[in-house]
Image: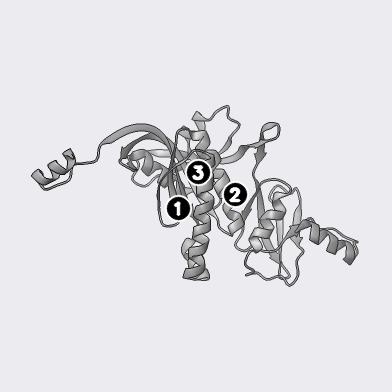
Amino acid sequence: MLAEIETFLTGSRPAAPTSRVLATVLFTDIADSTGQATRLGDERWRALLARHRQLVREGLDRHDGREIRTTGDGFVVTFDGPGRAVRCAVEVVDGVRDLGLEVRAGVHTGEIERLGDDISGIAVHIAARVTSAAPPSRVWTTGTVRDLVIGSGIEFAARGEHDLKGVPGTWTLHEVTANPVAGAGGCASRPLRRILVSWKSGCPVARDARGAGSWRWTGRSPNREAAGGRRLLCSALARSGRAELSGRRRAGCLRRPTSGSSSRSRRRRRRSDC
């Protein structure tokens, strides 16, 4: 009522009350969203975007994230603690691969200003710039986040110093390389594996960047543009641990190559692997 009286007397609405609080800010962004929308068309892209948003919001519910707003194809979220934000970001980045999408995420902890349902402040700008610097399918953070989660089991690798547009100074950014995953016996550390994908004789071939093994396509009629192929690849790689994909094209259901096996046993393995 007082606000309405002030608006009537002054001709302008009163400014929304502000409060500064310490929070962890997470930004997410779909990589190559314009290219995806162009390839899929408006209707299919809207449907995919809706599934993406549903998946992200389910993750926010599990990790007590507070959705502030969406940014077209990304999210702005706050958390009470940096550990929850990092775990949520890793879960989202991993989960959207099943949709054939790659998401980059940036996390920073600092003081923010609450403006009603929105937020502002330099900490928000820093989190946005960290996200812009991160490659697809990566979770990058500031050193502040890394220092605050020491002892949590979350592991990081330094990714050099960066100038964040509009932010004073040079910032050392870090990539999340291992994340505690809850299991039957508590939390275990699962390192991310980098999988390099290439094409040979028209078929996709995946190779572990550490030289630990390789996989080849086992489906029929390989098609480089096959819809859902990347989802099958992710599902197959997930059997041997968390996988981080890179490469321009990915398709097919992959398994470790074998030699000297019959066509019948190959068919059995193909059914079990896929």
Q: Report if residue 168 is visible in the image.
A: no
Gap between marks 1 and 2 measured at Cα? 15 Å
**According to the image, label 2 marks what residue?**
94
Going by the numbered disc 2, the residue's amino acid type is Asp
The residue that appears at 54% across and 45% down in the rendered structure is: 59
Gap between marks 3 and 2 measured at Cα? 14 Å
Q: Position of residue 150 (x, y in %)?
A: 55, 28
Q: Nearer the viewer, residue 192 or 112?
A: 112
Q: Earlier in the sequence, mark 1 or mark 2?
A: 1
**According to the image, label 3 marks what residue?**
60
Gap between marks 3 and 1 measured at Cα? 13 Å
Going by the numbered disc 3, the residue's amino acid type is Leu
Q: Nearer the viewer, mark 3 or mark 1?
A: 3
Q: Residue furthest top?
A: 151
The residue that appears at 57% across and 53% down in the rendered structure is: 96
Q: Earlier in the sequence, mark 3 or mark 2?
A: 3
Q: Secondary structure at mark 2?
A: helix
Q: Secondary structure at mark 3?
A: helix
Q: Quadrant of the N terminus?
A: top left
Q: Quadrant of the C terminus?
A: bottom right
Q: Residue furthest bottom?
A: 221
175 relative position to 263: left or right: left
Q: Residue furthest front?
A: 1
Q: Nearer the viewer, mark 3 or mark 2?
A: 3
Badge 1: how crowded within 10 Å, few (<14), some, or many (20+)? Answer: many
**According to the image, label 1 marks what residue?**
74
Picture quadrant where residue 18 is located: top left
Q: Position of residue 9 (x, y in %)?
A: 8, 44
